[in-house]
Amino acid sequence: MKRIRENYKVGNIGFLYCLLIISVILLGLYSVTIGVSKIGTLDVFKIISQQLLGFPKNLAVGEGQITVIMNLRIPRILMALLTGLNLAVTGAIYQALFKNDMADPFMLGISSGASLGAGIGFMLGGFTPFYAFLGALVANVLVGMLSGLKGKTSTIRLLLSGIAINYFFSAILSFIRLYSDDKNLTLFSWGMGSLASASYKRVIILACVTFPILFIFLLHRKELNLLLMGEQAAKAMGLDVNRLRKIFLILSSILIATTVCFTGTIGFVGLIIPHMVRLLFGSNYSKTLPISGFLGMIFVLICDNLSRSLLSSSEIPLGIITSLFGAPYFMYLIYRERKRSLT
């Protein structure tokens, strides 16, 4: 691990970013070929080239195949990339704000709060992202009250707070699902996490929310590094910790809420990816944030490919796939924390 960190100094970090960008592009192109409708790889590339570049002019494929590629699969892949980016980066932000490796919007119940708010918005017919934002904000406040934000929070108290909030909000959302009579909302499948409803309109909305907030996070990467030194040290360096924390929690809530509105609850991405990035590349947020974003995109896209391809007749909810990866990793973190406490 130490050798990997040493290898990626400023001199060749650009090579790593190029490698990650190429990986995302190649994986995205491969993902277009995956689906129930069997479309050959060559036909996929011909369709994309014809639709984007205008050649070849005469395609030996049907209009149905063009519709599947351009209107279903490509928006879904773009939504997967934005979802992975958002969840991984917000996970990294939460781990800095709480100074805890196990802090993650899903584990702390923030995603559940956003899901509950979105569910209420669906039923009331209002502006759903606003309700989701309120739900995420309420969850953030509850986490802060139960676990304590000053100094380094206790891992056990943080996890117990997240579990309690998760169960509470999930119970209310289950009640809403059970008694919802609007069949078009598909609250059950949405609640388990899915990219099936992706569209260009939703991708554009999510992108318009995502990139300004990520830009703000990157602008404050030095402040995030100061937070890792501890609250007292950060204050001694002139950082207004409480103000920064409030701003970041609000921005993270907006990001999580908008993502959850379109994808449902997808867990563990913000736990696994930032933690692995810090192990491999260190804790400097100048690298942690962008690398977490790239790896988050790759991880969610791989999981979505599995959700579409493991069963031939149906699709497995994306949230189930990410949990199959995330739950064992979470158990490993608990085991590691236990070993630390015994030494």
Image (cartoon, rainbow, N blue to C red):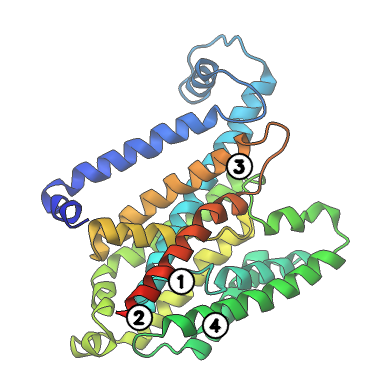
Task: Return the residue at label 3.
Answer: 307
In this rendering, the label closer to the viewer, 2 or 1:
2
Q: How many marks?
A: 4
Mark 4 and mark 3 in contact (Cβ < 8 Å)?
no
Q: Is residue 97 left or right of residue 204?
A: left
| Displayed quadrant of residue 72 | top right
Rendered location of residue 204, percent (x, y): 53, 49
Find residue 341 and name its label: 2
Marks 3 and 4 sit apart, C-alpha to C-alpha, by 30 Å
Rendered location of residue 185, percent (x, y): 78, 55
Mark 1 and mark 4 in contact (Cβ < 8 Å)?
no
Q: Amino acid at mark 3?
A: Ser
Q: Is residue 13 above or below residue 239?
A: above
Rendered location of residue 257, percent (x, y): 57, 66
Task: Return the residue at label 1.
Answer: 251
Q: Secondary structure at mark 1?
A: helix
> Which quadrant of the rendered structure holds the N terminus?
bottom left
Q: Secondary structure at mark 4?
A: helix
In this rendering, the label closer to the viewer, 4 or 1:
4
* Pointer 2 or 1: first along the chain: 1
- The 10 Å Cα crowd at callout 2, few under 14, some 14 to 19, many 20 or more, is few
